[in-house]
Image (spheres, rainbow, N blue to C red):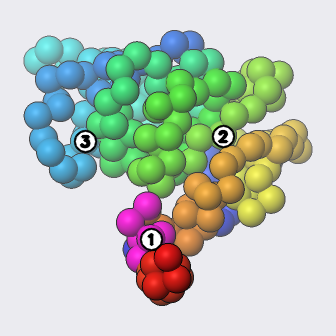
Amino acid sequence: MKQKFSTLISTCVPLPLENVDTDQIIPARFLKATDKEGFGQNLFYDWRYESDGTPKPFVLNDSRYSGSVLVAGRNFGCGSSREHAAWAIAGYGFRVVVSTFFADIHKQNELNNFVLPVVVSDDFLQRLFACIEADPATQVEVNLPEQTITNLANGDKEHFEINGYKKYCLENGLDDIDYLVEHKAAIEAYEQRA
């Protein structure tokens, strides 16, 4: 069983860039591994480091910003459908990604890896970016049962949508196989009737 998700209060890491694709999230040369371990250290690698490993001036290298919420620009996770991008986001420690739009496959990959993609309006997003820029200690509250996100700096609150099945899985710490195992008795009873 994975970590259950209910309500999260966290500071944010701002990434106010649009059309961030999966190759930028996790460069292709890191895709050789077949399990999820270690991907977090290579998140946004080419934006974080020079070829000799020297850190670049990038938000993940900026000690002012931390937390388990990544706030990104529109069309996050576009490009190829590599699940490794979601592995890297989860492996780094992000539990939530906020954007105005997610590429469909990447959105599902995040959900499958216990990262909650929260779609907000552009106005909400821009005000959140402004609050984070003014004060890196700005926090948001993400309430999955109520499907709301609240900017605790200014009280902005929005409702977000999520598939009911995926919501249930996140709230109960279940992946797709765990969900089937949880319903094993009902499945077997159905098979007996068929």
Query: Can you see residue 46?
Result: yes
Please give the name of the residue rendered at 42% of the width and 51% of the height, measured from the top-left corner. 113
Image mark for residue 39: 3
How crowded is the residue under tag 3: few (<14 C-alpha within 10 Å), some, or many (20+)?
A: many
Q: Residue furthest front?
A: 194
Query: Can you see residue 140?
Result: no
Res 157 quadrant in image: top right
Q: Nearer the viewer, mark 3 or mark 1?
A: 1
Q: Amino acid at mark 3?
A: Phe
Callout 3: helix, strand or loop?
helix
Please give the name of the residue rendered at 66% of the width and 40% of the height, measured from the top-left corner. 118
- In space, the residues marked 3 and 1 are separated at their CA atoms by 27 Å
Does 79 sit left or right of 139 as displayed? left
- In space, the residues marked 2 and 3 are separated at their CA atoms by 22 Å
Q: Position of residue 80 (x, y in %)?
A: 35, 20
Stretch of the chain drawn in magenta: 176-183
- In space, the residues marked 2 and 1 are separated at their CA atoms by 26 Å
Q: Quadrant of the N terminus?
A: bottom left
Residue 20's place in the image compared with 6, above or below, is above
How crowded is the residue under tag 1: few (<14 C-alpha within 10 Å), some, or many (20+)?
A: few
Please give the name of the residue rendered at 66% of the width and 49% of the height, measured from the top-left corner. 163
Secondary structure of the magenta portion, mostly? helix
Instruction: Check disc 2 and report the residue beneath it.
Output: 118
In primary-sequence order, the first of circles 3 and 1 is 3
In primary-sequence order, the first of circles 2 and 3 is 3
> In this view of the protein, which residue sits in the foreground, 123 or 155?
123
Callout 2: helix, strand or loop?
strand
Instruction: Check disc 1 and report the residue beneath it.
Output: 180
Residue 38's place in the image compared with 2, above or below, is above
